[in-house]
Structures are given as C-alpha cells and as structure tokens.
Image (cartoon, rainbow, N blue to C red):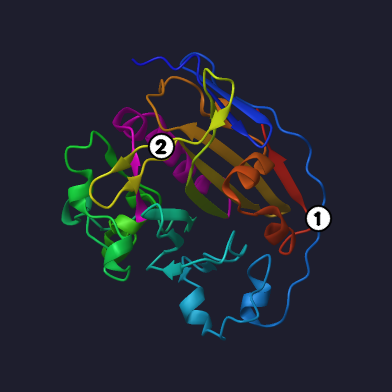
Amino acid sequence: MQRVLKSRWFVCGVSVSVGTALGLSVAASSREQQQQDTGGGLLGRLPVVPIPSVEATASSELTVFQGGGAVTKYGFPSLANIKTRESYVTSYDPRTRTASWVIEQLNPSSITGPSNRNNCDFKEDDSIHLYHRSTNADYRGSGFDRGHLAAAGNHKWSQKAMDDTFYLSNVSPQNPHMNQKAWNNLEQMCRSLTKHYRNVYVCTGPLYLPRQEPDGKLYVRYQVLGRNHVAVPTHFFKVLILERSEGVELRSYIMPNSPVDEKIPLERFLVPIETIERASGLLFVPNIMKRTNTLQAIAAK
C-alpha cells in the first residue's frame, strides 16, 4: 500500500492532508451568506446565475425525468457545455477532456432492473469535437482506470441508461486501487441511502488541488494521458442532496486520486460544502435553497 503522509493540498487557504491511517480532513472557514437573483424562463429558474444570451431551450432538452423526479431539480452548479443523457446531466470541460460535474438521481427504482454491465463498452462521445474528446487509446497502458462519474450501477433500470454511463465524457482517470475499493464503497453507500431518503441526488466531479512543494510555494500539477492529454485529477468530489419529508440533507466528500485504505470510514472524507465550491468553482447551496427552506449540512459524523 502506497503511503501518502507528507503531501499537503490547499484549497483557497484550506489545507487538505491525506494519510492511509487518518483519511482526509479539511478545515474550512464559515460561509458568507449570499443571495443571487435570477431572471425569468427555465434557465433563470435552474442555474445560480442565468445567462441572458442563451436562447430559450425546450424543457425536455434540459431536464431528464426518471423514477418520478427531475435530475435537475436543484439546478446546475455551472452552465458551461451542458449535455443530457438518459438519466444524468453533465457539464463537459474540453480542456481536461473530462466532465466538470455529472448529476444523477437515485431512488429504489433506478438502481434495480434488468440491465447488464457485460453488455456495455466504453466509447468515445462523438458529440464532442475530435480535438477535445478522449479515446480508449488514451487510457490504454496508462495505469489508470476509466473511472465512472455517474456510476453504471446507479442505472440498472434501463440498458440504455447504463450504456450512456460508458461514454468517455462520463469517465475520468482514476487510480485503480482507489476506484475499485474506497471509491466503489462510496458509490455503494450512495445507493444504500435510497432506502432511507425519498430521492438521492448525486453530483460528482474532478478536482485539481494545489500542493505545497519543497520550495514552500503552491503548484497545481497533474499528469495527462495519451495523445489527447486527458487530465488526471488530484482528487474527486461527491455532493449528495438527500430529500427527506421535512427538508434536505447535504453531504459532501473529497477523496484523493491515489491508493486509499478501503477500511477508512467514509465519514473521514466528509468536508464542508464550501470547500468543494471554492476548489471547483461551482455553487450548490444557492440552488438548493431555492427549493427548500430547511437544509442540514453534514460536514462530519
């Protein structure tokens, strides 16, 4: 097991230390309360900041209905390069050749069904320009897994829905041990929450965090794969929006893209939501507060 004991990542003044025995701890400053006004129309209701120049789009193109609810009920964390699939919505980053975020909705009906992972193959997303998309060749021999952002196991309700999770635009390079152990445990935990909450909304994405090097300065460094230079994130996040009858519960996690002891409790990876918002450039809380008057944020257990 590789030990990562001396590395320190920093998120806008917040230090993130990772250790095989300690997991991940984040100290974050308190959030400044912000209220943002939105304009009219569908785009004005969903995102935090509406873009007036965006032409009106049919709701069927922006909202995916599955299991009786809308994937985008709590809005978009950002507006760039939004794409919809059978059961998830994503924002693609052409610079990194991977998604900035993917949102999906889980409930008991979505995680059960006849779909078979053995019938799925990873495939290029031909809706993305050839210059800006990843290929299977980029991952071949790299030592990294093609890690799902929207997990295949979350969409057993439909073979088409599961097939769509195998687009490489829904994939990011993940350390094999992390992907198959601790990250898989986190995905399974998300599915288990459908037994206790009406709906589970999951937003997943990559992070590229600065690290302090021997000269005392902070640098953002990450590997790229293949001829298309697919970026290898330093960390990944998951934000869970959990619907209860009396309100909404929010849980947010950061996990390093390195070997992680799967015996570390997942609670060790809980962080304040503002840590992810600052590091990713995304916003979650303003959208959520438009849909509920009661929000309980779980930062540690």
Q: Position of residue 169 (x, y in %)?
A: 34, 58
191 part of magenta stretch: yes
Q: Position of residue 240 (x, y in %)?
A: 57, 47
Decide which of 226, 34 is in the foreground and name it: 226
210 part of magenta stretch: no
Sequence-wise, the earlier of marks 2 and 1 is: 1
Looking at the picture, which amino acid does disc 2 mark?
Tyr
CA neighbours of label 2 inside 10 A, class few (<14), some (14 to 19), many (20+): few
Q: Which mark is residue 34?
A: 1
Looking at the picture, which amino acid does disc 1 mark?
Gln
Q: Is residue 109 left or right of residue 239?
A: left
Q: Position of residue 114 (x, y in %)?
A: 26, 58
Q: Which residue is mark 2?
A: 222
> In terms of image quadrants, where is residue 131?
bottom left
Q: Is residue 125 left or right of residue 189?
A: left
Q: Is residue 171 left or right of residue 249?
A: left
Nearer to us: label 2 or label 1: 2
Q: Which residues are magenta?
A: 170-198
